[in-house]
Amino acid sequence: MLLTMSPSAVSIPRSLEAFVALAGVRAWRTRLAEIRDLAAAGPRAGQAIRERHAAELAIERLRSAGTRAPAPAERELADLAAQTVTLAGTLSAAGKQRLREVVRAGLAGEQTLIPLFHLLRTAALHRARGFTLRFAGLEDGAPFDLLLHGDHIEAEIACEVVSADQGRGVHRGAWYRLADRVDPDLQTWLGDHPGRYLLKMTLAQGLHGGLSDVPTDGDPTGDSLAELHGRIRTLLASSTRQDHDEAMVLRLDPLLLTAAQADALGLLTSLRQQFGPEAHLSVTTAGGGVFVMAARAGQENAIAVAFRKRMAAIAPTRLSGTRPGILAMFVEDTNRSEWRGLRERLELEGEARQFLTNPEARPVVAVTFASRLELFGLKGPDSAPDGELRFRNPGHPAARSPGLASAVLSSM
């Protein structure tokens, strides 16, 4: 069925209750309890967990907010939940069951509702451009998600969410867990060694793992985290102040601060300028003491490269090749400055255009990129001006089709 209606008229309380009913009340409550438990693991990892599950938490806040007006980002998320409910009412029984499975999958394990909301927002963008859409993945079980109908032309859209961690040697979730784990040791150590210190780490083999990982016996992620923690503790107890082998280099030095850097905000800004956007930073304070950890992987991040490889892997399987195809890529697990840097340094553009010259890209007429900033409706220099970053494949036969122009024309 073609979906052209907008759910904007659905009231927020009713639509959110209907969304939770679609997910299943028991599954929803279980998920919220899991998020609360994970967020209690430590201050840094807890904050990251709350940010990762911002959609679920915003929906729950609005369900119990009474007459409080939602913040702009909350309204965007509420509207996406409302669109889910509206979509469910237009699908066949099989399509509705597939949608319910997508919602429930987003409430399990490390998953979130972001893939579902990325799909709905992608559809909304194209409806606003004058296209009509069929949710072919849900309704027909097609490998692509959306069938776009334009002026005498159709196109397939495959929506994909990829974590930026796939291009990082040091995963953010693992770093937050390490920082929380080491923090009590650093506070105790600062009590015995008042002053300001900087521990610089180069992790040649990286540090892997997610926020929700629970280390178990024999788990490489847990083993590497425990080993690094142990080596930091050994370094603090020694008088050499350095430790290095082929896996990592640790060096403890005095931290030299100017007056302007003495507060936490000034310190973090200065450290970011000193170590660059790829560094992972953590600050521990105790009394008048300050202990900074700064870590880098053994090689530069390759986030855009990871997206090129992912696009090459999915294009032959998620697009039929019988119609023009669009890959709608969502860059997950990134922050404002990193997302802006990926665009301004033309890293995504370079890798996207390289991908479009490869044989795997033959069915692809365009690729698009978006992040949570655009999904949450946040405006400003850190977000993509057109709501997405878009690159057209000039070698595709449909690249200059007037009926597809608004969906495929490059935004840069």
Image (spheres, rainbow, N blue to C red):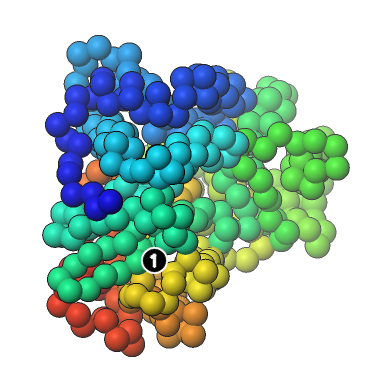
* 224 with respect to 100 (left or right): right
* 317 with respect to 88 (left or right): right
Instruction: Count every numbered label the image shows and give the total.
Output: 1
Q: Residues within 10 Å of mark 1 (few under 14, many from 20)?
A: many
Q: Position of residue 154 (x, y in %)?
A: 26, 70
Q: Which residue sits at x=21%, y=16%?
A: 68
Of residues 16 and 57, the one nearer the viewer is 16
Q: Quadrant of the C terminus?
A: bottom left
> For the residue labelled by badge 1, is the local secondary structure a helix, a strand or a loop?
strand
Q: Amino acid at mark 1?
A: Leu
Q: Which residue sits at x=48%, y=71%?
A: 315
Of residues 5 and 180, the one nearer the viewer is 5
Q: Position of residue 169 (x, y in %)?
A: 63, 58
Among the 4 quarters of the image, the one containing residue 80: top left
Query: Please, is residue 208 above or below residue 234 in the view?
Result: below
Residue designated by label 1 = 327
